Amino acid sequence: MRHGEPEGGTGLPGLAHACAALDSGDAAVVPNPPPMSYGVVATAAWRVNAAKGRALDQNVAASVHHPAEWHRLASVLDLPQHALHASSELLRLHLTVLLPLRREASPCGWFAPAVRDGQACVFDGRWAPTAALWDRYPRLYGSSANRTGMPPATSAAEARAYFGSDCAVVDGDALGGPSPARTASTIVRLDRRGRLSLHRSGAHDRAQRAGPAGYLRQLAELTGLPADTCSN
């Protein structure tokens, strides 16, 4: 969704291996922008769950990094127009976002594994250092790179320790630079009136050091959405 950003990552260690794994239907581990931890992705939702060692039918998140897939989902969302635009801004920040479906909408095809209780759990995984992978696969499911019950992997080495030969690992540590404390993404929710709330504290709000409520107010100011701080 961010076609103006610089491309790169063609020489990132493990990237070609990860693409080959996804071509074969297997899962792969990819780095996320700091301070987010690593994630595991696949073209089939059950492959993500199998890699994590959990129930194969467990819900996962779906990436809407391809504009056509975002528009496909947006057509069945139960949101005011201004909140649809704001959702794009939240996704650009690499937040995970829960969005309400219209009550009469079906589970929306390939998005079905990301739908629970009338909400679609989505993110935008495209990041310049791994853009070649995301551009190659317009439909990817994802979750934190961890085995069930364990914290998410914060380095390529941790990811390899978790998954061994089960997943190809793209080594984002090779990019160098500062190494902030990493954790899973913050999850925010929009209700049908376009009110914004914090579903799960994570990397984004912790990095701002404003506290969950303070970060929610920052997002509200950025997007123009009202913040529902009472539910946090």
Image (cartoon, grey):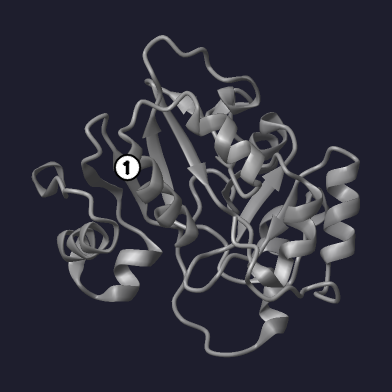
Question: Which amino acid, mark 1?
Answer: Ala
Q: Are there few (<14), some (14-19), or many (20+) residues within 10 Å of tag 1?
A: many
Identify the residue shown where x is 67% and y is 70%: 128
Q: Secondary structure at mark 1?
A: helix
Tell me if 33 is positioned left or right of 168 in this view: left
User: Is residue 95 depicted above or below 26 in this figure?
Assistant: below
Image quadrant occupied by the N terminus: bottom right
User: Who's the residue at 68% across and 60% down the image?
Assistant: 30
Which residue is the site of mark 1?
Answer: 83
Give the residue furthest to the bottom. Answer: 177
Residue 165 in the figure: left or right of residue 55:
right
Q: Residue 8's x, y, as percent?
A: 76, 75
- In this rendering, the answer to whether 22 lies above or below 185 is above
The percent position of residue 151, horizontal first and vertical second, equals 48, 57
Q: Position of residue 34 (x, y in %)?
A: 51, 73
**Residue at image coords 63%, 45%:** 67
